[in-house]
Image (cartoon, rainbow, N blue to C red):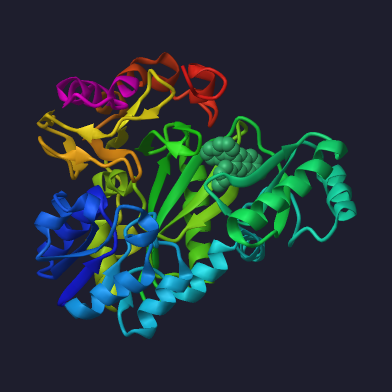
Amino acid sequence: MFSRILIANRGEIAVRIIRAARELDIETVAVHSTADADSLHVKMADRAICIGPPPAGESYLNIPRIISAAEVANVDAIHPGYGFLAENAHFAEVCRSCNIEFIGPSVEAMGALGDKVKCRKLALEHKVPTSPGSKGKIESEEQAIKLARQIGYPVMIKAAAGGGGRGMRVAHNDISLSSGLANAMNEAQGAFGDATVYIEKYIEHARHVEVQIIGDQHGNVLHLFERDCTMQRRHQKLIEESPCPVLDEEGRDEICRAAVRLAKAAGYHSAGTVEFLMSQEGEFYLMEVNTRLQVEHPVTESITGLDLVKLQLRVAAGEKLPLTQRQVQSRGHAIEVRINAEDPDNRFAPSPGRIDHLQLPGGPGVRIDTHCHSGYRVPPNYDSMIGKLIVHQPTRSEAIATMQRALSEFQIEPIRTTIPLHAQLMRNADFRESNIHIHFVEKLLGGSGNP
Ligand code: MV4
């Protein structure tokens, strides 16, 4: 096992990783920007190194500075958390060339799954369900139009290097396909330095269902069941839960097995997530693979009783997975809500600043992952997520009741947060019946998801 690791991240996920490392008797090194000097991850780690000013490009995204800190502290491995450098194959390559283990999949697996055209090809070869569309990249406008007419409109144009909703267009006819193609390629070139796009049949009013997987470096891959992340706004998930309330045993088995097949085909190790769209007819289509630990991993930890970060550390150190697929059982129902420092009554405007008063909920079935405390100043420089509230109960309706009770106990003053929005959603009849799709929040709050 590693003796010492560096956490190349901040906030609640840095705290989460430090906790797992401590339980495995691994020393931790935090890195931080000047904006985070008083942050909890800095206090909790065995050692902390300031790596730069607040802008992420000069701190949490700055590879030379992070590698320098790792060399100075003499760490065995780096955990990237999520966001920042977590899915940067170049960073993983730099780490390993410096003899520092990158706690994540191989560079090759990141390359094969991170490129959505390559990922789609691999999925087609291994009978992982995909939406009808192009086999590879789009080579010409004529080819795109011919294909779109074949599969039928509407179609979606997607960037190979995209993800999380960037570089996408929906086209309903030849005209909008031609203009959408040019726009999408332009946007993709600008955003990712890669204009490669592909097209797929557009699935309307779908749900977002994803499968958690974990693999070791000996070829073993397990699935840890699914999470339903349909409740989102502008590609930011708001609520995640497991099990998916509308999935039957057959559907669950289908996507979980498909996810393991794809991971094995890519030679995947570490934690990862295979994302699917679920149509209103109950059909599944691969969206993308996230080659990192995700924000919503506590939902899976709750229903399986496993510690995903400890498992991730174990497999990164070369250990075999300590259990078989049959030993992974799903129990009860878990729901997570993301608490963001945003004002849901004012177009989700960021609401940074000092937290004068913080009172956290507790009691049976309640978990909180946060780096916040009374007196903590939420910096304006980073993601607005300041914590996660996770509940676990025998049934979904009991989990909702516990979530409502926990939200009513939660006090964060004076900054604005998404807590009132979550209280509203927990009361919503469509949410309670899980009668929702990926555009539900935008519909509920008005065109763009703003009230
Ligand atoms: C789609 C789709 C409909 N049909 N693909 C959005 C993020 C990126 N990962 C893929 N996305 C979508 N792909 C087909 N063939 C609709 C979306 C989509 C979406 C997916 C999940 C969660 C929220 C979404 C919001 C808008 C569009």
Q: Quadrant of ligand 1?
A: top right
- Residue 420 part of the magenta-drawn span: yes
Residue 325 at what x, y percent from top left?
Answer: 35, 61
**Residue 251 position (above or below residue 349):** below
Q: Residue at x 53, y 32 (%)?
A: 438
Q: Quadrant of residue 134?
A: bottom right
Q: Quadrant of residue 229?
A: top left
**Residue 445 position (above or below residue 149):** above
Q: Residue at x 28, y 76 (%)?
A: 68
- Residue 342 part of the magenta-drawn span: no
Residue 420 at what x, y percent from top left?
Answer: 30, 20
Residue 66 visible in image: yes
Q: Quadrant of residue 308?
A: bottom left
**Residue 346 position (above or below residue 438):** above
Q: Residue at x 17, y 59 (%)?
A: 18
Q: Quadrant of the N terminus?
A: bottom left
Q: Is residue 250 left or right of residue 344?
A: right
Viewer-side residue, 27 vs 151: 27
Viewer-side residue, 45 vs 130: 45
Q: Is residue 411 left or right of residue 220?
A: left
Q: Characterize the magenta stretch by its predominant secondary structure.
A: helix
Residue 223 visible in image: no
Q: Residue at x 36, y 61 (%)?
A: 58
Which segment is the magenta one?
A: 400-422
Residue 405 at what x, y percent from top left?
Answer: 19, 21
Residue 358 at what x, y percent from top left?
Answer: 12, 30
Q: Is residue 356 left or right of residue 425?
A: left
**Which residue reaches farthest front?**
53
